């Protein structure tokens, strides 16, 4: 009897297994929330970078998502949708692009993953990379582009699309050398646009992007202030600013130019304070923050005194943070110097605090700065002071893969 029962059970198991193989069933449902399985990075943060060797190397990859049967995949570069589908295969002009992969189900459920695309130029190509803080301009303003092979540029193209096909304006440079050119920003509505460089044979090359502002916009200098010290806020279209307000204190004794507002900072306690500004016509000045453009922001009074503000992207021999003898002269021996920085996606992250000739270091090279909290602080002792004084009174910060935002001391 037991033998007969065993045979029957085995027959039932074989029959069930055979049904499974012949008639597979899908566990995905249109009601499932979408989940991106690939691409990913080893740190598990979901951020990733595609580095392409030249403009002829395609951005080529695929996305794995669940529930795949009910999901649409959209690819965005600098906020513009450039492709819909599982697998992208696209060449791009040289430049640095913010990438977002967005997945949306039939029921409207969505998810996304952010990364970046870096397309390197050919050595012989004209090319200009935007600074870490981006480019900002107002109509009528002179814009300077630093780069390579700029002398062959016949026109600067402002486009609404990545590939420079939907052209808004073409402008002749007002000045150019091999490593720099200038042009006058034409009349355009507010917005972010792509810059392209065109040679005499109408070939287009990458130059990242630019953001146009018709109103008054503050870009830097608003994050903190020192009571009683000169306070400089920089931006575009600031010539009509009439007042600066910190909490309940309104300051009208200011000097306003197209690119800056200068005043003596009011007395205030250490901590956070509300900051706003008005134009002569009563309109609000906007502050460009990490949360977007706002008419009121938070500023801080710190025990620290700021001696340098950026930002500057460290790229070894490209851009260096250079503190002049005048800037360093106010730093007393025994104080702590703080270096504030961001850590973008890069091959590696390193910082070295040295003198202008890269001789003896105040702080030897630190690799793995992505694991070091910002700000980085070090003691400005007698050894550091002597090194600085023996090198013209100046100090430099060099390295790779960091955006240096400001330097303070306490």
Image (cartoon, helix red, strand yellow):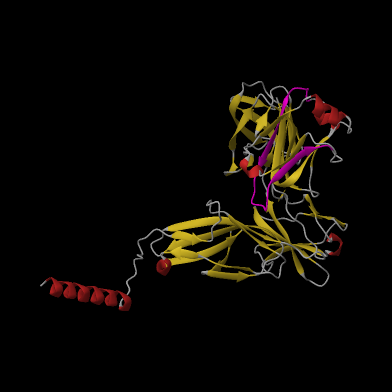
Residue 225 image point, x, y percent: 68, 28
Q: Is residue 332 magenta?
A: yes
Count of labels in the image = 0
Q: Which one is in front, 354 or 229?
A: 354
Q: Left of 9 or right of it: where is 186?
A: right
Q: Left of 6 or right of it: where is 77?
A: right
Q: Which one is in front, 408 or 184?
A: 408
Name the image quarter holding residue 238.
Answer: top right
Q: Is residue 191 magenta?
A: no
Name the image quarter holding residue 375.
Answer: top right
Q: Which residue range is magenta in the image?
A: 331-355
- The answer to whether residue 217 is above or below residue 26 is above
Residue 123 image point, x, y percent: 81, 64
Give the quarter of the figure containing the C terminus. top right
Residue 168 shows in the view: yes
Give the quarter of the figure containing the N terminus. bottom left
- The answer to whether residue 100 is above or below residue 388 is below
Q: Which one is in front, 289 or 339?
A: 339
Name the image quarter holding residue 81.
Answer: bottom right
Q: Left of 199 or right of it: where is 336?
A: left
Residue 323 shows in the view: no
Residue 59 image point, x, y percent: 63, 67
- The answer to whether residue 237 is above or below residue 300 is below
Residue 211 image point, x, y percent: 68, 52
């Amino acid at each position: 009897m037991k033998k007969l029962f065993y045979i029957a059970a085995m027959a039932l198991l074989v029959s069930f297994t055979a049904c499974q193989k012949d008639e597979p069933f899908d566990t995905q449902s249109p009601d499932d929330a979408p989940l991106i399985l690939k691409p990913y990075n080893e740190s598990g943060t979901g951020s990733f970078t595609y580095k392409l060797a030249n403009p002829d190397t395609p951005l080529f990859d695929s996305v794995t998502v669940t529930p795949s049967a009910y999901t649409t995949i959209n690819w965005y570069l600098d906020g513009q949708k450039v492709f819909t589908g599982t697998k992208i295969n696209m060449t791009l002009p040289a430049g640095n692009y913010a990438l977002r992969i967005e997945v949306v189900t039939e029921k409207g459920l969505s998810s996304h993953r952010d990364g970046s695309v870096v397309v390197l130029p050919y050595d012989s190509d004209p090319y200009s990379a935007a600074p870490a803080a981006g480019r900002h301009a107002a109509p009528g303003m002179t814009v300077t582009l630093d780069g390579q092979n700029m002398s062959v540029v016949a026109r600067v193209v402002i486009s609404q699309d990545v590939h420079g096909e939907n052209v808004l304006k073409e402008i002749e440079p007002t000045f150019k050398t091999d490593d720099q050119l200038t042009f006058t920003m034409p009349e355009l509505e507010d917005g972010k646009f792509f810059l392209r460089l065109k040679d005499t044979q109408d070939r287009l090359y990458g130059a990242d992007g630019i953001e146009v502002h018709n109103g008054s916009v503050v870009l830097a200098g608003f994050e903190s202030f020192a009571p009683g010290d000169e306070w400089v806020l920089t931006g575009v279209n600031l010539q009509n600013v009439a007042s600066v307000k910190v909490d309940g204190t309104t300051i009208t004794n200011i000097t306003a130019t197209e690119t800056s507002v200068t005043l003596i900072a009011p007395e205030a306690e250490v901590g956070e304070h509300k900051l706003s500004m008005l134009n002569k016509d009563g309109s609000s000045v906007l502050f460009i923050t990490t949360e977007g453009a706002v008419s009121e922001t938070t500023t801080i009074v710190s025990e620290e005194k700021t001696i340098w503000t950026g930002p500057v992207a460290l790229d070894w021999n490209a851009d260096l943070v250079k503190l002049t003898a005048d800037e360093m002269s106010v730093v007393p021996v025994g104080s702590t110097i703080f270096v504030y920085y961001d850590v973008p996606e890069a091959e590696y992250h390193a910082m070295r605090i040295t003198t202008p000739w890269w001789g003896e270091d105040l702080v030897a090279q630190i690799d793995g700065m992505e694991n070091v909290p910002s700000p980085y602080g070090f003691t400005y002792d007698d050894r550091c002071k002597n090194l600085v004084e023996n090198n013209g009174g100046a100090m430099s910060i060099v390295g790779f893969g960091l955006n240096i935002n400001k330097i303070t001391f306490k």
